Structure formats: structure tokens, C-alpha cells
Image: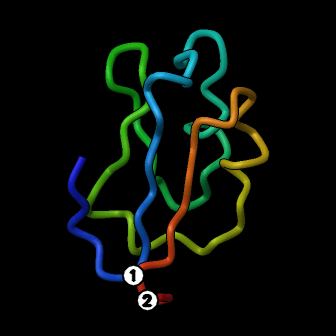
Amino acid sequence: MSSTSEFIRVDVNMNTCVGITQCGGCVRVCPVGIFQKNGDAPAVVAKNEDECILCELCLQACKPRAITIKKLYET
């Protein structure tokens, strides 16, 4: 997925993700709505990506460790 974000890129590795039914932690815990349901898979809402507050709640809630957050402003 290509990011429209300027500061943060949030990715969900769909090869590792077990889906909303088995996990869904990212959708439940994100305080700024970066994730939404896309069938049984979480999807990143591109327009909300730069709203990420780096709380890392999604990283903690993701049982299979399928989420990565990259700060685009760091080299």
C-alpha cells in the first residue's frame, strides 16, 4: 500500500495478520481511527495516518506482531 502520509507510515503485514475475527486489536485500541475493518482484515485509513500519536497501543494489541510504524521524518 502506498502512503499518502507525510510524517508516519503504518503498515499491516497481511502475511502475518490473523484478521479481525481472531485478533482485531488494532481496530479496537487506536484512539485516532487509523484502522478500519475491510472484511475480516484491518485496513489503514490513509487520510488518518498522519494523526498517529505514536502511542503504540496498536503494536501492543497486535498478537501476531503484524503492524509496523515508520517515522518518515527520520532518516
The image quadrant of residue 57 is bottom right
- Judge the density around disc 1: few (<14), some (14-19), many (≥20) Cα neighbours within 10 Å: some
Percent across and percent down for residue 27 are 55, 37
Q: Which mark is residue 26?
A: none
Q: Is residue 42 left or right of residue 20?
A: left
Q: What residue sits right under mark 2 in the picture?
A: 73
Percent across and percent down for residue 44 are 37, 46
Residue displayed at 28% across by 57% down: 46
Residue displayed at 42% across by 14% down: 40
58 w.r.t. 28: above or below: below
Q: What residue sits right under mark 1 in the picture?
A: 7
SS at badge 1: loop
9 w.r.t. 16: above or below: below
Percent across and percent down for residue 24 are 60, 26
SS at badge 2: loop
Q: Is residue 53 left or right of residue 35?
A: right
